[in-house]
Amino acid sequence: MTSLEGKTAIVTGSRAGIGLYIAQALVQRGAKVVLTARSDDELREVAKSLGDDRALAVAGDGGDAGHRRAAVAAAVAHFGSLDLLVNNIGGAEGFGVPLVTGDLGAFRRTLDLNLTTTLGWTQAAWHGGLSRRGGSVLNVSSMAGAMTVPNSGGYGIAKAALDHLTRQLAVELAPEVRVNGIAPGVLPTEASTPFIAGREADIAAHYPLARIGLPADVGSAAAFLLSDEASWITGQTLLVEGGRTLFSGPV
C-alpha cells in the first residue's frame, strides 16, 4: 500500500462522498488530514471517526478566502506542515435543461464553484507553505468532463475546464508542486444515490468493467497520485470510471 506517513493533507468537501472516501484512504496510508465542509457538527463526527490524532475538522464556506487561509494555518499549527491539497468542492446547478434554454446565472455559479473555488484553495495552499516545502495537489474532476451528457452541459464544461486548470497549474507550480486530477465515474454518494438507487444493474451494463465504482477505487487512485510513487507524474487527470467513457453502445 502507498505510504503517506509524515504528510499532512487538506481535503475540501470531505464530510461525505468522494471527499470522505479520499480522506479515509489518506489516513489509512499514514497521512494526517484537515477536513473542510460547511457543517461543523457533522464534520467533527467525521474527524472523530478517523481518529483525533489523525484528523482535524475546520468548518466553513469553501468559497470564502478567510476560511481557506484559516484551514491552511490550522494544518500547519496542528500537524506541523501542509504537504497535500485535495480540491474536492464542486457540483452544478441547472441539471435537466439544455444549455440554450438554461439560466446563465446557474451556469456562472457552476463554473465558479468548480473553477474559482479550486483556484482559490490552491492559491491559499501555495502561499501557506507549498511554495516553500513542495508537495502535491489533486483536483477532483469527473468523467463528465470527457463526454457529453444530455441536459447536463454546464457540469461537463466546468469539469473539462478544471482538467485544463490542472494542466496549467502543473506548469506554473513546477517543480515544487505536482498537480494532477482524478475523474471518477458513478459511485455511491449522497448526491448520486437519488439517481442510481434501483438502477445499479442498468448503469453497470454501460461500463466495460461491469460495475459502478467503490469508495476504494477513488481513494486508492487519489492516494497514488498524491504520493511520492507518482513523483514523475504531473498535469494528468486520471479517469477512474471502469471504462465508461470508452463505451458507445451498438452502432
Image (tube, rainbow, N blue to C red):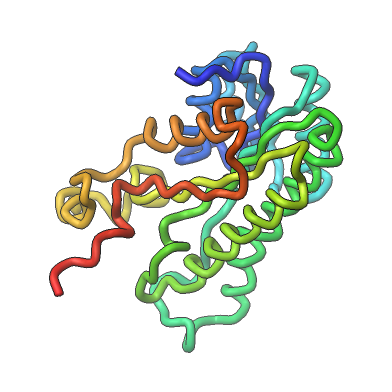
What's the residue at 23%, 66% (across, down)?
Answer: 248
User: Where does the image place residue 18, in percent across and percent down from the top left?
Assistant: 47, 40
What's the residue at 76%, 46% (across, down)?
Answer: 173
Task: Specify whether residue 63 is in view.
Answer: no
- Figure check: 43 above or below 160: above
Q: How many tags in the picture?
A: 0
Can you name the residue that lies furthest to the top here? 53
- Figure check: 31 above or below 241: above
User: Where does the image place residue 80, in percent across and percent down from the top left?
Assistant: 79, 18
Task: Specify whether residue 68 is in view.
Answer: yes
User: Where does the image place residue 169, in percent across and percent down from the top left?
Assistant: 71, 52
Can you name the residue that lies furthest to the front here? 232
In the picture, measured across the screen, residue 177 lies left or right of residue 44, that is right
Residue 205 occupies which quadrant of the picture?
A: bottom left
What's the residue at 49%, 66% (across, down)?
Answer: 155
- Quarter of the figure that contains the C terminus: bottom left
Between 40 and 161, the residue placed more toward the observer is 161
Between 200 and 157, the residue placed more toward the observer is 157
- Quarter of the figure that contains the N terminus: top left
In the picture, measured across the screen, residue 96 lies left or right of residue 108, that is left
What's the residue at 63%, 31% (across, down)?
Answer: 35
User: Where does the image place residue 142, in percent across and percent down from the top left?
Assistant: 46, 54
In the picture, measured across the screen, residue 56 lies left or right of residue 216, that is right
Between 121 and 207, the residue placed more toward the observer is 207
